[in-house]
């Protein structure tokens, strides 16, 4: 099982604002340096924690979230606010505000947005 995924960013607070708009996102905790600057922001997505950590911009190739039919209207509203990069039968890909590749997938069922 995956415990967490970490993404490096020069500004964890700004990037967290984007991720907290994703359906199902719940802010867990914010960690600060002694100076009061944000060191990292942790966000729960189900059982996995996304850790946005201050530092050099680095991310996985793609971070893909699970489509939940119970959150259909939230996902469609969210996807209408972002620029779709690509779409397959199962996954819709989009970028966060630092150009990291994200997606939402319903594999093995085909993802229908209509």
Image (cartoon, grey):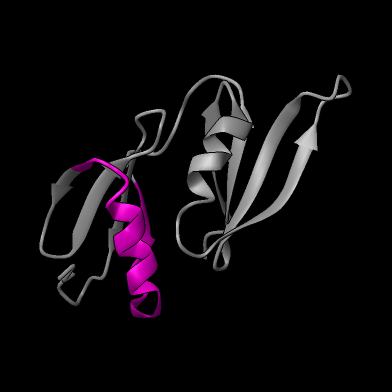
Left or right side of 29 for 103: left
Q: Residue furthest left?
A: 89
Q: The C terminus lies in which quarter of the figure? A: bottom left
Taking the magenta stretch, the answer to whether it contains residue 76 is yes
State which region is magenta: 63-84
Residue 4: x %, y % from top left: 57, 52
Spot occupied by residue 39 in the image (x, y as percentages of width and height): 72, 29
Residue 72 vertical placement versus 19 (above, below): below
- Left or right, 111 with respect to 100, comes to left
| 62, 74: nearer the viewer | 74
At horizontal 43% and vertical 34% (from top left) the residue drawn is 59
Taking the spot 17% from the left edge, 65% from the top edge, the residue there is: 90
Name the residue furthest bottom: 70
**Residue 106 sits in which quadrant?**
bottom left
Splitting the image into 4 quarters, where does residue 108 fall? bottom left
Q: Position of residue 48 (x, y in %)?
A: 55, 60
Give above or below for 96 relative to 98: below
* The furthest residue to the right: 34
Residue nearer the viewer, 74 or 85: 74
Residue plotted at (82% across, 25% down): 33
- Classify 99 as above or below 74: above
What is the number of callouts on the image? 0
Residue at (30% x, 43% y) in the render: 82
Q: Is residue 22 left or right of 43 when viewed as pictured?
A: left
Left or right: 80 with respect to 21?
left
């Amino acid at each position: 099982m995956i415990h967490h995924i970490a993404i490096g960013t020069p500004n964890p607070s700004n990037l967290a604002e984007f991720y907290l708009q994703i359906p199902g996102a719940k802010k867990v905790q914010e960690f600060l340096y002694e100076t009061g600057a944000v060191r990292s922001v942790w966000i729960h997505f189900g059982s996995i924690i996304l850790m946005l950590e201050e530092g050099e911009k680095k991310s996985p190739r793609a971070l893909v979230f699970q489509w939940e039919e119970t959150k259909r209207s939230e996902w469609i509203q969210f996807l209408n606010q972002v620029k779709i990069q690509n779409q397959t039968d199962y996954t819709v890909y989009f970028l966060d505000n630092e150009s990291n590749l994200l997606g939402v997938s319903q594999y093995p069922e085909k993802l229908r947005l209509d």
